[in-house]
Image (tube, rainbow, N blue to C red):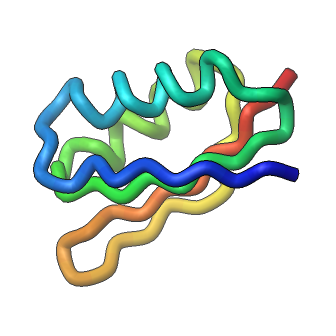
Amino acid sequence: MKELYINARGMQCPGPIMQLHKTLKDAEPDTEVVIEVTDSGFKKDVQAWCKKTKNELVSLNEEDGVIIAKIKKKS
């Protein structure tokens, strides 16, 4: 399984979701993307985006003001 990383710290909505969408669009199924974001609204956005796109939100954590999400692309 391939794992990709996105540093979206400092970006405001919709920047992090756009980066995530762009990265997963061309990725193979079962690819996992770890994205780090400082925009507090991202937590709600990524959950809604995963439901809408049928991708799996593997984990969603926050440490010292940085939101770290792991998303797995579904086929």
- The answer to which image quadrant residue 9 occupies is bottom left
Q: How many marks?
A: 0
What residue is drawn where x is 26% and y is 68%? 66
What residue is drawn where x is 48% and y is 21%? 22
Q: Is residue 66 above or below residue 7?
A: below
- The answer to which image quadrant residue 25 occupies is top right
Q: Position of residue 17 (x, y in %)?
A: 36, 29
Q: Position of residue 43 (x, y in %)?
A: 34, 49
Name the quarter where the C terminus is drawn.
Answer: top right
Q: Position of residue 45 (x, y in %)?
A: 35, 34
Residue 5 placement, left or right of 54: left
Instruction: From the viewer's side, name the closer residue of 49 and 17.
Output: 17
Residue 18 placement, left or right of 73: left
Q: Is residue 8 above or below residue 69?
A: above
Residue 2 placement, left or right of 10: right
Q: Position of residue 50 (x, y in %)?
A: 57, 30
What residue is drawn where x is 19% and y is 73%? 65
Q: Is residue 43 above or below residue 26?
A: below
What residue is drawn where x is 54% and y is 55%? 34
